[in-house]
Each structure stands twice: as structure tokens, then as C-alpha cells.
């Protein structure tokens, strides 16, 4: 009897079995779209043996197979049939070899499961009554023996793992016991301390408490002094910067004042000239228009120069006054910080100085409306920074 024997009648209990038997082996392992040398010929024996076992399964008495076994057999047959379909439809690409190895591995696993269910649910005597050739029986018995050897090998490996785990568990138990003994010894040595030793330690700590508090107070005083000195060193360059900027703007204001005086003199001279100059009534109209136009343009230029120079003079005096005010605020801050040891006083001076520096003050030289809407938020931020610094 050939392993691809006559296909039994279709049966709804194992639907995938009929699909497996109806597909020729050559159609599975060869594909005309694959290049030469690429096939599944190494799976030929596996596929033919599977068909042989499926044939025995379909020719057996289904009433003797438990329902749960039927379900498991169907699952494995479905998985095997999908693998065959995947082989037939596989396209050759750069991942062909990698995909092929994965399919072969899954095919072998499914084959082992089908063989296992067949040998577990169908009596060997019944299988022998169906098969006509001894070669097939010998092959089936050989597969059964190989499967049993495989199971024995797995049991041996599992036993080795169990023994290894037991050894590890025993080692860990010994280490835990040693640790418990060491802990007990530590507790015992701690309990051996007498009350006299504890009292002696308390006396030593009490005697040194005052020294520690005094040292801590001196350290805090030194730290506050260092912080004050650091603040003064940081602020002093800014005070000098404001004073330098104030002097620069003062010098600039003097220059613009000179320019303004010159512009006034020119405007007055031009005005006197225009009043004394006469033009005859009978002059040509185009000449008269040019004469008047030139005077108007010169007058506008001189007036604009005077206004611009005066404006620049007022701006320079305004910046001089503001920067001088800020420099005086920082100098006052240095004096207050150096004279006071109270942290609350220092914080108040810092807030007031900051308001003076960042506020939009009116110097009297320019019509500027004060806009101090940002000062409350700035004050809150500075108070928060001061609190965090004290912590």
C-alpha cells in the first residue's frame, strides 16, 4: 500500500484531512516560479508520512476517539494544512531562505503533534489491520519508538533541571540560615551594652551640646556676614555702571544744549534777515515763488533742528537723572546692609531698591506717565526668592 493511498470518502469530522490528502506532494514541494535549487524536497518524507497517518485516521472508527482528542486533532490538521498552503503560495524574495526555515520548523512540529495524537487515540492493532505492507508498519513503529525516546530524553532533561533547582534552593537555604545566625549574634552583642555605657554616652553628648550650639551660632553669623559681603561685591559694580552712565548722559546733554543754543541763534538770525529783506512788487511771479519757497524750506529746517536738539537735550538730562537716582539707591542699599544685622531689614531694603531700579520714574524733563503695574508681581517674586534663600 502506497503512503499516498486511495483517499477515503469525505467526512465532516476532519475537514482539513481531506484537503491535505487531495493536494499532490509534487505541487507542494515544487513551484515553477521559484529559481532552480529552491524547493522543499527535504520535506517530502515528512509530507508523505503525514498523508499516510491522515489516511489511517480517516479509515479508523471515529466513535473510539474522545471528543477532546477530535478537537485537538482538528486544530493540528488545520495548522498543518495552512502551512502547506503557505508553501504553495510562497513567493521568492530576499527573505525566502529565512521564511523557509521557519516553515519547515513549524511543519515538523505539526507533524509530531499529528503523529502523537494518532498513536495515543488509535490502537496499534487497529492500525495494523488497516495497513497492508510491513514496511509501513515498521515505519510507524519506528516513529513511535523515536517519539518515545524523545519523550524519555525530555523527561531526563526535566529531571536534571529539577535537580539543579533543588541544589540551588538548598544553597540559598543554607545562606539564609547563616544570615539569620549573624543577625542573632549582632542582636546579642548589642544587648550586652550596659546602662552605664549608655549613661556615659548621654553625659558626653550633653556636655558637648553647648559647644555645638555655640559653634553653630558662630557659623551662622559668619555665613550671614559672608552673604552680606558677597551682596555688596555683586552690587557695587552695578552702582558704578549707573554712575558712569549718568556721567555719560550728562556730558551728552551739554553737547545737545550747545547745539540747541546754536540752533536758536541761527533761527533768530534767519528771522531778522527775512524781515529786513524786501522784494519788489513788479518781480516775476516764478521768481517770487522760488524766493518764498526757499525761505519757507530753510525756516522749516532750522525750526526742526532746534526742536530736535532741544528734545535730545531733555532726553539726555532725563537719562542722567534716572541713572543717578539708581546709583544713589544702590549706594544707600550698601550702607543699610552694612549697618543692619536683621534679615527682615535687609529683605525690605532689597525690595525697595529693586522697586527704585525697575520702576518707570518721572524725572520732570519728559512727560512720562508712570507705569508700575509689574511691580507687585516683581515684589512677590523677590519675597519668594528671599524665603527660599533663608531656608
Image (cartoon, grey):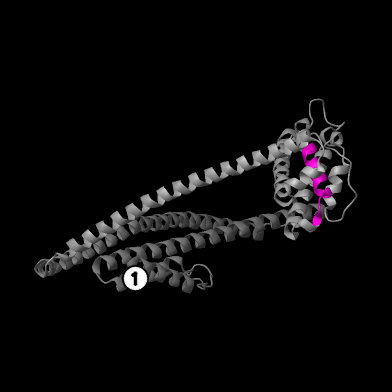
- The residue at the point 57 percent across, 41 percent down is 153
Q: Is residue 138 visible?
A: yes
Question: Quick one: 357 or 200, which is closer to the camera?
Answer: 200
Is the residue 84 above or below the residue 265 in the image?
A: above
Is the residue 352 above or below the residue 65 in the image?
A: below
Q: Find disc 1 in the rendering and name its residue.
A: 347
User: Which residue sits furthest top?
Assistant: 36
The N terminus is located in which quarter?
A: top right
Q: How far from the left and from the top, in percent, is residue 266?
A: 57, 55
What span is in magenta? 47-62
Magenta-colored stretch includes residue 54: yes
- The residue at the point 39 percent across, 70 percent down is 351
Q: Quadrant of residue 133?
A: top right
Q: How far from the left and from the top, in percent, is residue 208?
A: 12, 66
Task: Describe residue 66's horizontal placement relative to residue 164 as left or right.
Answer: right
Q: How far from the left and from the top, in percent, is residue 193?
A: 14, 65
Question: Quick one: 25 or 91, which is closer to the camera?
Answer: 25
Q: Is residue 81 visible?
A: no
User: Which residue sits furthest right?
Assistant: 9
Magenta-colored stretch includes residue 244: no
User: Is disc 1 placed on a helix, strand or loop?
Assistant: helix
Is the residue 363 above or below the residue 128 in the image?
A: below
Magenta-colored segment: predominant secondary structure:
helix
Badge count = 1
Amino acid at each position: 500500500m502506497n503512503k499516498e493511498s486511495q483517499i477515503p470518502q469525505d467526512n465532516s469530522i476532519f475537514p482539513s484531512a481531506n484537503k491535505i490528502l487531495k493536494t499532490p506532494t509534487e505541487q507542494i514541494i515544487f513551484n515553477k516560479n521559484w529559481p532552480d535549487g529552491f524547493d522543499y524536497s527535504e520535506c517530502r518524507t515528512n509530507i508523505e508520512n503525514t498523508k499516510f497517518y491522515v489516511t489511517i485516521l480517516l479509515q479508523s472508527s471515529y466513535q473510539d476517539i474522545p471528543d477532546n482528542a477530535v478537537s485537538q486533532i482538528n486544530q493540528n490538521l488545520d495548522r498543518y494544512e495552512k502551512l502547506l498552503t503557505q508553501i504553495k503560495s510562497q513567493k521568492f524574495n530576499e527573505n525566502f531562505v529565512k521564511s523557509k526555515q521557519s516553515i519547515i520548523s513549524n511543519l515538523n512540529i505539526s507533524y509530531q503533534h499529528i503523529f502523537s495524537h494518532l498513536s495515543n487515540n488509535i490502537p496499534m492493532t487497529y492500525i495494523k489491520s488497516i495497513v497492508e505492507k510491513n514496511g509501513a508498519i515498521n515505519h510507524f513503529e519506528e516513529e513511535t519508538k523515536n517519539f518515545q525516546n524523545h519523550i524519555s530524553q525530555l523527561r531526563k532533561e526535566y529531571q536534571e533541571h529539577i535537580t539543579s533547582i533543588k541544589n540551588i534552593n538548598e544553597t540559598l537555604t543554607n545562606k539564609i540560615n547563616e544570615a539569620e545566625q549573624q543577625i542573632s549574634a549582632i542582636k546579642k552583642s548589642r544587648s550586652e551594652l550596659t546602662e552605664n555605657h549608655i549613661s556615659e554616652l548621654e553625659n558626653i553628648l550633653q556636655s558637648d551640646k553647648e559647644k555645638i550650639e555655640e559653634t553653630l551660632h558662630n557659623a551662622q553669623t559668619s555665613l550671614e556676614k559672608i552673604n552680606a559681603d558677597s551682596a555688596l561685591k555683586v552690587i557695587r559694580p552695578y552702582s558704578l555702571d549707573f554712575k558712569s552712565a549718568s556721567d555719560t548722559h550728562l556730558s551728552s546733554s551739554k553737547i545737545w544744549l550747545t547745539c540747541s543754543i546754536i540752533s536758536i541763534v541761527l533761527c533768530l538770525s534767519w528771522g531778522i534777515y527775512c524781515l529786513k529783506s524786501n522784494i519788489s512788487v513788479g518781480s516775476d511771479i516764478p521768481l517770487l515763488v522760488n524766493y518764498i519757497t526757499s525761505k519757507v524750506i530753510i525756516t522749516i529746517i532750522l525750526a526742526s533742528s532746534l526742536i530736535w536738539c532741544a528734545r535730545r537735550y531733555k532726553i539726555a538730562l532725563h537719562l542722567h537723572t534716572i541713572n543717578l537716582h539708581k546709583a544713589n539707591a544702590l549706594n544707600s542699599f550698601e550702607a543699610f546692609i552694612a549697618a543692619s544685622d536683621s534679615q527682615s531689614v535687609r529683605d525690605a531694603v532689597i525690595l525697595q531698591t529693586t522697586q527704585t531700579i525697575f520702576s518707570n520714574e518721572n524725572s520732570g524733563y519728559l512727560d512720562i506717565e508712570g507705569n508700575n503695574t509689574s511691580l507687585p508681581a516683581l515684589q512677590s517674586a523677590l519675597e519668594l526668592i528671599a524665603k527660599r534663600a533663608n531656608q
